[in-house]
Image (cartoon, helix red, strand yellow):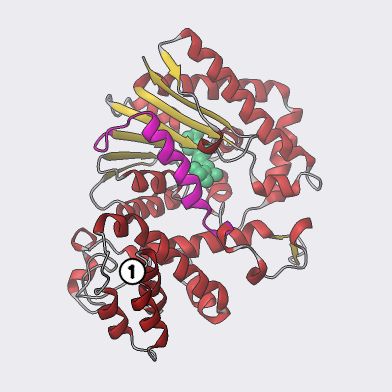
C-alpha cells in the first residue's frame, strides 16, 4: 500500500491559476491533506478546462519526484513487478477506481472508475524498470555494469524527465493521429505492441474511444498490454489477436481498419522470423523489457548477417507483409528509430548495428512502394519525431 498526499498537488493547482494567497496558505499549514483539498477548491480564477488539460501532468510530476527522492518507496513501487496498480478509494472514481480494496466490485474491471492515479503509478513503475534495464545491463558473469555515460551515476542522479519515455513517444503518435485527422471512434490496428503502451499513450492523449486491435504473437505481452490499454482507455474496445502479422493477414480478420500503427517492431519481426521454433520465440520475447539479453540478440544478428540467403528471404517477406497490411488500412504509421539499448552496446556487440540498418532498409523499400500505390505521405516536422536519425512512415490513402 503506497500513500500519496495532496499538498504538492494542490499547491501546484493554486500556482497554475496564480492564486498565490492559496498556495501560501497551503505552504504555511501544518500537514493536513483534508485542509489542502478544501483550499484547492477555493481558487478564484479556476477554469475547469485549463485544469483538466494540466492535472495529469502535474500529478505525474509530483508522484515522480516523490518516488525518485525516496528509495524505500521506489523499492515498494518496483516490487509490484508487472502488476496493474490501482488507487482504491470508494469516493473517487476519477483518480481512483471508485471502490474499496475489500469490495467485491474490485474484481470487475468494467465497473472501475478512471484510476488515473493508479495508471500514473503503473506508468512510472514501468518507466523506472525500463530505465534500469537500459542503464544497467546484466553481463553473463552476473555482475551489474552500466553504460559508458552513466558509469558512476545512481538512479537519483538521472534527469527525472528521462523516465517518462512511453508518455513522450506517445505524444509523437498523438501528433501524427492529429495530422491524419483520425476519428476518435475509429479502428486502429497495432502490430507488435509488446507489453509497453507507447501507441496506447498516444491514443489516450488523443482522447480515443474506438476499437484497438492488438496483433502480438507473445501471449504474456499481449495479455499485459491489453489490460494496460483497457485501463488507459476505459471507453475504447480492445481486441486481442495472439498471432504474427503474417497470420493476421492470412486470416483476413478485419476489413475496415482506419490506421495501422507499429512502433519500433521491424528489427524484432526480422529476428522473430529467424528464430525458428515457437518456444524459442516466446523465450526471446517474453523477457524483452525486464531482462533484455543483449548477448543473445547480438549473436542472432551475427548469424543472420552471415546467412545472406535467409536474410534476403526474411527481408522480402517482411516488406510484402507490410505492404499488404497497408492495403487493408486507410492510413499507416510505422517507426524505426535507433534503440537506446543497441546504441550504448554497439561497441561491445557490433553486429546489433545491423538491426537498425536492416529495419531502415525495409522501411525505405516500403516507402518506395508507396509512390506506386494510392498512399500519400504526410509531411513530418522536427517536433513530430523522436530524433533526427528516426525513420517514420506516416501516410494515408488519397
Ligand atoms: C520490441 S517489442 C515491442 C516494441 C513496442 N512496440 C515498443 O514500442 O517498444 C517487439 C514485439 O514484436 C513482436 N513481434 C515479433 N515478430 C512479430 C510478427 N511477425 N508480427 C507481429 N509482432 C511480432 C514481439 O513479440 C515483440 O513483443
Residue 243 occupies which quadrant of the picture?
top left
Examine the rendering and report whether any part of residue 159 can be seen.
Answer: yes
| x then y, percent, for residue 265 | 53, 37
Q: Residue at 78% x, 45% y: name it.
A: 349
| x then y, percent, for residue 198 | 46, 47
Chief SS of the magenta region? helix
Q: Residue at 69% x, 20% y: name it.
A: 309
Using the image as rendered, state which of residue 356 and residue 300 is in the foreground: 356
Using the image as rendered, state which of residue 377 and residue 85 is in the foreground: 377
Most extreme residue toward the right is 347
Q: Is 184 left or right of 341, judged from the image as shown?
A: left
From which residue to which does the magenta span run?
Answer: 162-186
Q: Is 199 left or right of 113, judged from the image as shown?
A: right
Which of the image's four quarters has the N terminus?
Answer: bottom left
**Residue located beneath label 1 in the image:** 86
Number of marks: 1
Residue 97 occupies which quadrant of the picture?
bottom left
Using the image as rendered, state which of residue 352 and residue 329 is in the foreground: 329
Q: Residues within 10 Å of mark 1 (few under 14, many from 20)?
A: many
Q: Is 173 left or right of 348, judged from the image as shown?
A: left
Most extreme residue toward the top is 372
Q: Residue at 50% x, 49% y: name it.
A: 168
| x then y, percent, for residue 146 | 74, 61
Magenta stretch holds residue 173: yes
Q: Is 170 left or right of 390, judged from the image as shown?
A: left
| x then y, percent, for residue 209 | 25, 43
Amino acid at each position: 500500500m503506497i500513500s500519496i498526499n495532496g499538498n504538492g498537488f494542490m499547491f501546484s493547482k493554486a500556482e497554475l491559476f496564480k492564486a498565490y494567497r492559496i498556495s501560501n496558505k497551503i505552504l504555511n499549514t501544518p500537514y493536513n491533506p483534508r485542509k489542502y483539498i478544501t483550499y484547492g477548491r477555493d481558487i478564484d480564477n479556476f477554469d475547469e478546462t485549463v485544469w483538466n488539460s494540466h492535472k495529469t501532468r502535474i500529478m505525474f510530476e509530483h508522484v515522480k519526484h516523490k518516488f525518485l527522492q525516496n528509495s524505500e518507496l521506489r523499492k515498494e513501487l518496483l516490487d509490484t513487478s508487472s502488476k496493474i496498480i490501482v488507487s482504491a478509494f470508494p469516493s473517487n472514481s476519477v483518480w481512483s477506481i471508485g471502490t474499496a480494496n475489500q469490495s467485491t466490485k474490485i474484481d470487475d474491471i468494467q465497473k472501475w472508475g478512471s484510476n488515473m492515479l493508479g495508471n500514473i503509478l503503473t506508468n512510472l513503475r514501468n518507466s523506472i524498470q525500463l530505465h534500469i534495464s537500459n542503464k544497467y545491463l546484466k553481463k553473463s558473469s552476473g555482475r551489474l555494469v552500466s553504460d559508458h555515460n552513466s558509469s558512476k551515476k545512481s538512479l537519483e542522479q538521472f534527469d527525472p524527465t528521462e523516465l517518462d519515455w512511453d508518455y513522450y513517444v506517445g505524444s509523437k503518435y498523438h501528433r501524427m493521429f492529429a495530422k491524419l485527422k483520425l476519428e476518435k471512434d475509429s479502428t486502429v490496428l497495432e502490430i507488435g505492441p509488446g507489453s509497453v503502451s507507447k501507441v496506447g499513450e498516444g491514443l489516450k492523449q488523443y482522447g480515443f474511444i474506438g476499437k484497438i486491435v492488438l496483433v502480438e504473437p507473445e501471449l504474456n505481452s499481449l495479455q499485459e498490454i491489453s489490460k494496460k490499454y483497457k485501463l488507459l482507455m476505459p471507453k475504447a474496445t480492445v481486441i486481442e489477436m495472439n498471432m504474427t502479422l503474417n497470420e493476421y493477414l492470412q486470416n483476413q480478420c478485419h476489413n475496415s481498419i482506419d490506421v495501422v500503427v507499429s512502433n519500433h517492431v521491424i528489427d524484432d519481426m526480422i529476428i522473430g522470423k529467424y528464430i525458428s521454433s515457437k518456444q524459442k520465440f516466446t523465450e526471446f520475447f517474453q523477457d524483452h523489457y525486464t531482462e533484455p539479453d543483449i548477448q543473445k540478440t547480438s549473436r542472432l544478428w551475427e548469424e543472420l548477417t552471415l546467412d545472406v540467403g535467409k536474410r534476403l528471404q526474411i527481408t522480402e517477406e517482411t516488406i510484402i507483409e507490410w505492404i499488404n497490411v497497408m492495403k487493408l488500412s486507410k492510413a499507416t504509421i510505422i517507426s524505426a528509430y535507433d534503440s537506446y539499448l543497441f546504441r550504448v552496446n554497439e561497441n561491445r556487440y557490433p553486429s546489433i548495428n545491423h538491426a537498425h540498418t536492416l529495419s531502415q532498409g525495409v522501411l525505405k523499400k516500403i516507402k518506395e512502394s508507396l509512390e506506386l500505390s494510392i498512399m500519400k505521405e504526410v509531411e513530418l516536422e522536427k517536433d513530430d519525431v523522436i530524433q533526427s536519425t528516426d525513420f517514420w512512415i506516416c501516410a494515408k490513402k488519397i
